[in-house]
Amino acid sequence: MLQWQYAITPDAAMTLALVAAMAIELEPARKAARAVEDSRPLGQAVYCGRIGAHDVVLAETGMGKVRAAAVTQALIERYGISRLIMFGSAGAVNPKHDVGTIIVGRQLIQHDFSLFSGRAMLGWGRDWVPADKRLSAQLLAAGKRLGLPVAPGRIVTGDQPVAHDETRQRLWSEFRADCVEMEGAAVAMVCHLNGVPFAIARGLTDRADAQAVRAFRRRIRDVSKQVAGLAVECVRGL
């Protein structure tokens, strides 16, 4: 686990952020919050709305680690984010999970980042970034209230889509990951460095194998509605 942290003291006006990589993933939550566009930091639309008793900021981060990290940092600095929930889609890595399951991340790591291999040259191990236990538990509880198939797990992140049996098997063997996606660990790291509690939920659209692209296209809309609905229900219960 990471032992170091850089924290920014939040100001009095704190709010909750809901973020997703793609518009199709974010849109159901944006509609539920009746959110309207507020600004465009880094050229990315940010929406403000309300869910239950909570003011919320919603943003599409874009795909990949760099874009996701940059947008997350901009949100924290501009809106004084107090908590963040990321949601969206992923490919299954753990063979026990069925497509349609929603993984709530306990910890996240960049599977395509290392200093050489194994333990790094400075003596660091592979550092998993832990999600906030309380917020993650609230996501799991929201899933149970909605009757959704939710499970806690490990999420691995990389900048290239995984659609290959051998790669999926390697991620399972090396990381014992439950799912793979392209932004979560970057968002997690930015939140961790800023002292912002975060949780991440990913709905499985495919098995990260040779059929992944076709399966993703077939299921992304339905999975996005479920995972966004989970995030909205979680906020309502906070």
Image (cartoon, grey):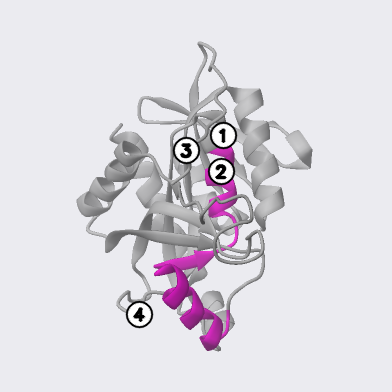
Q: How many neighbours does mark 3 have within 10 angstroms: few (below 14), some (14-19), or many (20 or more)? A: few
Provide the residue span drawn in magenta: 163-191
Q: Are circles 1 and 2 on residues that touch, CB within 8 Å? A: yes
Tell which circle, 2 or 4, labels the residue nearer the N-terminal end. Answer: 4
Q: Nearer the viewer, residue 26 or 183?
A: 183
Where residue 103 appears, x then y in whole percent?
Answer: 37, 60
Tell me which corner region of the image, top left, top right, bottom left or bottom right, holds residue 135. Answer: top left
In this view, the residue farthest toward the top is 12
Q: Is residue 172 magenta?
A: yes
Amino acid residing under circle 3: Gln
Gap in Å between the C-alphas at discs 3 and 4? 31 Å
- The residue tagged with tag 1: helix, strand or loop? helix
Cβ–Cβ under 8 Å for marks 2 and 4: no
Spatial distance from mark 2 to mark 3, Cα to Cα? 13 Å
Relative to residue 195, is residue 22 depicted above or below? below
Q: Which residue is mark 2?
A: 189
Hey, which residue is sitting farthest right in the picture?
Answer: 43
User: In the rendered structure, which amino acid carries the disc numbered 2?
Assistant: Met
Q: Please, what secondary structure does the residue beneath circle 4 have?
A: loop
Name the residue that disc number 1 marks: 193
Q: State the residue at coordinates (61%, 35%).
A: 47
Amino acid type indicated by mark 1: Leu
For disc 3, the marked residue is: 3
Between label 1 and label 4, give the one nearer the viewer. Answer: 1
Q: First in sequence, mark 1 or 4: give its number.
A: 4
Q: CA distance from mark 1 to mark 2?
A: 6 Å
User: From what the image shows, is residue 44 above or below residue 161?
Assistant: above
Mark 1 Cα-neighbour bin, 10 Å: few <14, some 14–19, many ≥20: some
